[in-house]
Structures are given as structure tokens and as C-alpha cells.
Image: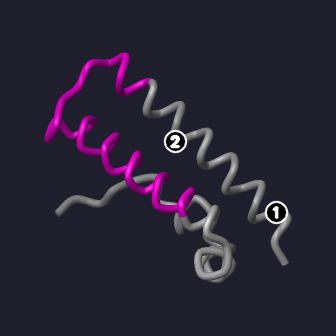
Amino acid sequence: MSHTPHELAEEFPGDVEKMHALKAEDAHFAKLFDDYHAVNKTIHRAETKVEPMAEEHEEALRKQRLALKDEIAAMLRTAK
């Protein structure tokens, strides 16, 4: 199996423990986390031609991934 780029642990390496804690404590964060991984996996499968899709759809998914990542980053910044 190939490595999936843009995993949250790679995007926020200093916040891995914080992400685990937030997933357990905050249902909204857990949903964002799961949604990010689902979208990221779909993008990776499209990029590697496992499940090709229209460029417009792939671009929309990339924008969705970025929005999810931005919201996750904001939550990580304000978490203790």
C-alpha cells in the first residue's frame, strides 16, 4: 500500500497528542478529523488513478480538505 500524503500527523507533527485528546473530548473535532481523512483518502485515490475523477471534482475536494485543515488548525491553536 502506498503512503497517503497530507495526513494530519504529518501536517501538525507537534500536535499529535493534542489531536488524540481533542478527538476523545470534542465530538465536533472528531467529526472534522474523520471527514478530513475521508476526503484526503479520496483525493489520494484520484491522484494515483485508483479511482479517477473529473478534475473539477478533485479540485473541489482539495478545497474541502483545505477548509477542514484550516478549521482543525484553528481548534488546535485554541486547545490547551
Q: Earlier in the sequence, mark 2 or mark 1?
A: 2
Please, what is the three-letter code of the amino acid marked with disc 2? Arg
- Mark number, residue 45: none
Q: Is residue 51 magenta?
A: yes
Give the residues in magenta.
31-59
* Residue position marked by numbered label 2 in the rendering: 65
Q: Is residue 60 above or below residue 12?
A: above
Residue 37 placed where, x, y %?
42, 56
Residue 20 placed where, x, y %?
59, 80
Residue 69 placed where, x, y %?
61, 49
Left or right of 15, for residue 60: left
Given residues 14 and 75, the one toward you in this image is 75
Left or right of 55, for residue 80: right
Quadrant where the C terminus sits is bottom right
* Residue position marked by numbered label 1 in the rendering: 77
Q: Secondary structure at mark 1?
A: helix
Left or right of 48, for residue 31: right
Given residues 10 and 77, the one toward you in this image is 77
| Whether label 2 touches label 1, CB < 8 Å | no
> Residue drawn at (67%, 56%), measured in percent from left and top?
72
Q: Label 2: few (<14), some or many (≥20) within 10 Å? A: many
Please, what is the three-letter code of the amino acid marked with disc 1? Arg
> Residue drawn at (53%, 68%), measured in percent from left and top?
9
